[in-house]
Image: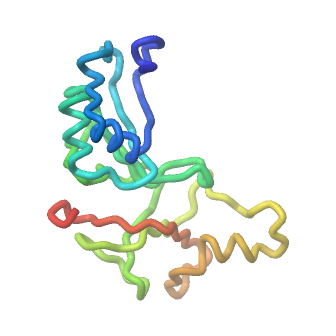
Amino acid sequence: MLSTFSGITVMGTGAKWLAVLEERGVKPRQTHDLSTLRAVLSTGSPLAEHSFRYVYNDIKEDVLLGSISGGTDIISCFMGSNPSLPVYEGEIQSRNLGMAVEAWREDGKPVFNESGELVCVKPFPSMPTHFWNDDGGIKYTKAYFAKLVRKGIADIILVIGISFLLDRNTV
C-alpha cells in the first residue's frame, strides 16, 4: 500500500474496491505499516455497512472513514466526512461546507429520513457553468436541471442522479 512507502495520511478509494478487498479476505493491517494513515475516503457508490466494519476491523481501527458524494464534473463533494462528528455504518456524515443540498421526492418537495434525489439548491464556486460544444446549453440543462423543478428556483437547482437512503435503519 502507498501508505507504507510514502507515508500518506488520506487515502481515496472506491466503495466497490473496498468490497472486493473484503471478499478476497485482504487484511492490510496485518501486512502493512498504516501508522500514518488518518482517513479513508470512499466514493463511487454508497459504502455498504459491512464495508464500514471491514475498514475498521481489517484496515485500521482508528481511521476516519468517510463515505463521500461529489464528482469530477463539479470538482467538489456535496457530502462527506467530518472529523467533529461520529461515524455511523451506512451513512454519510454531513453536508460539506458551502453545499446547500437536500433530498427531494419526485414532486420536488424535500424529504427527511427517507430516500430521495440529491438536489443542490444554491450555486457553489466550482459549479459547472456549461459543457464544451453545447451551444445554447441544451445538454447542460438536460444533465443538471431537467429532472426536478420547484417553481421559482429552477435556475439554481442542480440535480445529481444519485439516490441516498438517509435513515440508517433502512440502509
Residue 33 in picture, x, y percent from top left:
32, 13
Report the residue that reaches farthest toward the front: 24
Write down the quadrant of residue 136 in the picture: bottom right
Name the residue rendered at 47%, 13% in the picture: 6
Q: Nearer the viewer, residue 29 or 134?
A: 29
Residue 47 in picture, x, y percent from top left:
32, 50
Q: Nearer the viewer, residue 17 or 5?
A: 17
Q: How many marks?
A: 0
- Taking the image as shown, residue 142 lies to the left or right of residue 152, namely right
Give the answer, above or below, for where 117 lies relative to 55: below
- Taking the image as shown, residue 100 lies to the left or right of residue 18, namely right
Residue 3 in picture, x, y percent from top left:
41, 18
Residue 66 in picture, x, y percent from top left:
33, 42
Report the residue that reaches farthest toward the left: 169
On the rendered image, what quadrant is the N terminus found in?
top left
- Taking the image as shown, residue 120 lies to the left or right of residue 135, namely left
State how the image is colored. Answer: rainbow
Give the answer, above or below, for where 94 lies relative to 140: above
Write down the quadrant of residue 61 in the picture: top left
Name the residue rendered at 76%, 73% in the picture: 137
Give the answer, above or below, for where 68 lies relative to 158: above
Name the residue rendered at 35%, 30% in the picture: 39
On the rendered image, what quadrant is the C terminus found in?
bottom left
Name the residue rendered at 55%, 69% in the picture: 158
Q: Nearer the viewer, residue 89 or 80?
A: 89
